[in-house]
Image: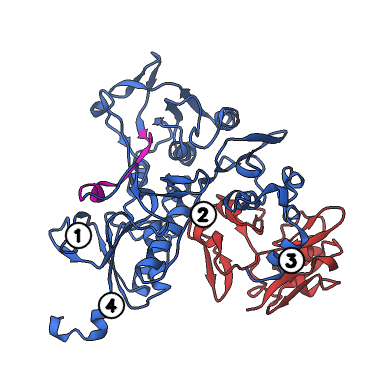
Amino acid sequence: MPAECVGDKEEALKNHVIIGNGTAAVGCIEGIRSISSEDRITVISKEPHPVYSRPLISYYLEGKTDLKRMLYRDEDFYKKNGVDIRYGVTAEHIDTAKKKIKLSDGTTLKYDDICVAAGSSPFVPPMQGLDSVEKKFGFMTLDDALSLEKELTKEARVLIVGAGLIGLKCAEGIKERVGSITVCDLADRVLSSILDSECAGIVQKHLEAHGISFLLSDSVAKFEGNKAIMKSGAEVEFDILVLAVGVRANIGLIKEIGGTVNRGIVVNEEQKTSLEDIYAAGDCAEGYDASIDANRVLAILPNAYMQGRTAGINMAGGTVTFDTGIPMNSIGFFGLHIMSAGAYDGERKEIRHGDVLKRFFVKDGKLGGYMLIGETDRAGIYTALVREKTPLSEINFDAVTEKAGSIVFSADSRRKKFGGTV
Amino acid sequence: MKRVYVNEEWCLGCHLCEYNCAWANSGIKEMSDALKGRKIYPRIHVEGDDKITFAVSCRHCEDPMCVKSCIAGAIRKEDGVVRINREKCVGCLTCVLVCPYGALTPAEDGIMQKCELCLTNSCGEPACVKGCPNHAIVYEER
């Protein structure tokens, strides 16, 4: 449309650009649309797919979902929200003086504000001989899962490097479709980012009972084609290699133009970066973690949505802050559920019976964090105590360590929760 | 909008709400066929101790944590009602991790289910409320 035809109303509409097309981007779109139905929204999507539920790629391989059901939003999501979605394009440079973004297809895009929701990328440490491995895969994207799927055979021996959430979910997802799985990790335990040694030991035992083998406190010294020679001297022959060592926040776009970055793009509680009119959200952002009272990358899906939504509302002229982010995870393997939240220091209280272990960490009179294995009913009540920093002196915490329940709260507090609008 | 509210001082702890919930959502005509000899998976649960009891079901929050946290995009809020698309749910329990009311529990198949106010089942209004003998739960505007 020629510039002179643009009326005052059109002129007043903002151009919001979202770099990335994952959960944080959806939060941002829905945040913007909760304030403005008319502002323009453009989404730059590196992946050629409408937004899908990224953590579901292992469930896809396991046959628990399919490409249609794992869409994170309905197929008409972009259309319904008036979003100009650009697939297969990346943002290459942000010119803050001219307020333009240079895209990988050679075009430029004008913006009034940006939400960087660019996620993270797999981190692959230098490993000698990696080039000699024929079938190697990451496990971050739908395309990773689809490529891996093509190579799965009942005889295949799989080596997964990384016993974190990604590596282990991959193992569970492909277990019934391959011959054998070995998981190795430099750490001395599985899920080292969310579990302590004893809890990790329970999970490892359960995974081993389901046929997964482990090589812990060990790493690959070098690859020779289909053989990995470990630092310990052990040798592992494999047909398929999955690299799930870790991820790094995609901070490049902001770093190169002088924005404040650390492990992630540093944001305040409104999701603003140090650069004017540029916000960041999700796995690329380093926002406030209430459990440690400091900034940290919290690469979990709920956090991505909430940060994205916060950014979106603020971009569209609203004013909100998000200061209740905490690390929290719910993950299951072969029927064993595990939940964790918050920080693990302070006085330890625990409940154990049979295969159940519930470990709570009480610090400064508050529930600072917890790990639950095998018994997770109503755990959101514990999570709320962590998130809201509820003084344990005001509630009856001992009544709910065995079994979570709202009996923990006073009658008055329950009246508000269950007798009012929340 | 109308929600289910709890008057805990009236709750007898009789668990009838749980049975009525399970029956209403079973799709089975006769109560005895739906419930007798079976483990039930209701969407409302009586909690408490030896002194006080109360029934907990979804609060249909203004700003629901479960909707924002669902890793499958399976939980939505439509016309004020928080609903779950069980076809999309993979049973990861993230909604259990975040619901501050402990209102979500899995069904027999491990897939989540939740109170949707009986608006789409044969009852048409909350069966728990309809069958509560002492008005300990009510369905009204507040």
Which span of residues is magenta-colored?
A242-257
Pointer 2 or 1: first along the chain: 1
- Check if mark 4's residue and mark 2's residue have beta carbons within 8 Å: no
The answer to whether marks 4 and 2 sit on the same chain is yes
Q: Which residue is mark 3?
A: A415
The image position of residue A410, as x and y in percent, is 75, 57
- Check if mark 3's residue and mark 1's residue have beta carbons within 8 Å: no
Alpha carbon separation for disc pair 3 and 1: 51 Å
How crowded pointer 4 is (Cα within 10 Å; few <14, some 14-19, many 20+) is rated as some
Chain A is shown in which shade? Answer: blue
The image position of residue A415, as x and y in percent, is 74, 66
Pointer 3 or 1: first along the chain: 1
| Type of amino acid at the residue the image marks with label 2 | Thr
Answer above or below: position of B115 versus A404. Answer: below
Q: Secondary structure at mark 3?
A: helix
Instruction: Give the foreground label among 4 and 1.
Output: 1
Q: Which residue is mark 2?
A: A324
Pointer 4 or 1: first along the chain: 4
The answer to whether marks 4 and 3 sit on the same chain is yes
Residue at horizontal 35 percent and vertical 29 percent from the top: A239
Numbered label attached to residue A13: 4
